[in-house]
Amino acid sequence: MKKEYKKILVILFLSIAAIAVILSGIHIYIFKTLTNLYRMLIDLVSYSVLGIVVIEFIVRIFKLYGKKAHIEKYIGSIITIFRLFSYFILILILLNLLKININGLLIGAGFLSVIFGLAAQTSLGNIFAGLSLLSLKPFHIGDKITISTWVYPQLPPTYPHDLMTVSITGKVTEIGLIYTTILDEDNIIFYIPNNALNQALIINHNKMDKKQIKITLEVAINKNYNIFRKKLEHEIKKNAYLLKTIFKYEISISFISNSTYGIEIKAIVEKSNEKIIRDKIMDLTMNLLNSL
């Protein structure tokens, strides 16, 4: 890949140098005897060739980047937009060389650009955000991620004394220029705008070896917390599997009311064993609560 970049740079440098030498020679030795018409024609040809070489060189860089980043099917749209914009600028330069008044054209183009920019503001924002995601790569296709954005509120769940952050968890199936597609565990497909995704909190589960699990229980106020805690710690230490797979755990009181109090159990575990460990801790806590 580096050799291809070097080869292109060398070709571009030699092309520009050759054009510069030719233009210098023409201006020094020939232009003195040429009429203004011929000078204009030579300038048109020279600037046209130089402009096309530079534009197509940048297009080639885009293609190499798309191939390297595995986004060939998306880079084509960007190249088309870039070519339209670049050749439009080149045409304006050539018209200026022909002494054609382009002020009206520039005013009209500016007016249309403002209208187009306002109309396509959201789409352009999503495109640039998509390019940012494809470049920075916070996740790849096939990764399991959890997304939570600042625009989502915190909602009270069915369980009291806690808050639930609205989030989406699923597998990334496609990263497009406008939307990123996520398939959750219930086979629901989410099309998330890249602009929102670029501002979101993203948790990539594929890049995590460990994970924290949290279990919250509501217990009657007459149940002795200290006895429950000591018995649970004893059961965890007695269980060889839990002792091996739990890296760190914490048992604490999360809230107190007139008739109940909450017990919160947090544990750092291996991501692959999360469900098994959660089920085992739940079984232990249920048995202990029934015995108190």
Image (cartoon, rainbow, N blue to C red):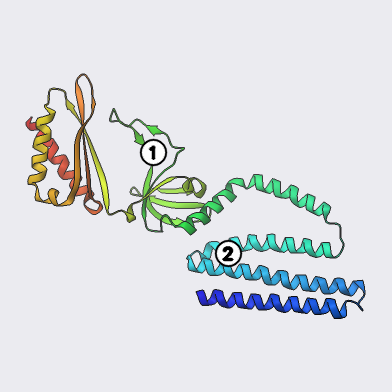
> Badge 2: few (under 14), some or many (20 or more) residues near its Cα, within 10 Å?
some
Asked if residue 289 shows in the view, the reply is: no
Asked if residue 231 shows in the view, the reply is: yes
Q: Secondary structure at mark 1?
A: loop
Report whether 261 appears left or right of 240.
right
- Between the residue at mark 2 and the residue at mark 1, the CA separation in whole angstroms equals 36 Å
* Quarter residue 36 falls in: bottom right
> Badge 1: few (under 14), some or many (20 or more) residues near its Cα, within 10 Å?
some
* Quarter residue 4 falls in: bottom right
Q: Residue at the spot x=48%, y=55% of the render?
A: 133
Three-letter amino acid code of the residue under disc 1: Val
On residue 76, which mark appears?
Answer: 2
Front residue of 292/48: it is 48
Three-letter amino acid code of the residue under disc 2: Gly
In this rendering, the answer to whether 29 lies above or below 152 is: below
Quarter placement of the C terminus: top left
Report whether 50 appears left or right of 273.
right
On residue 200, which mark appears?
Answer: none
The residue wearing badge 1 is 166
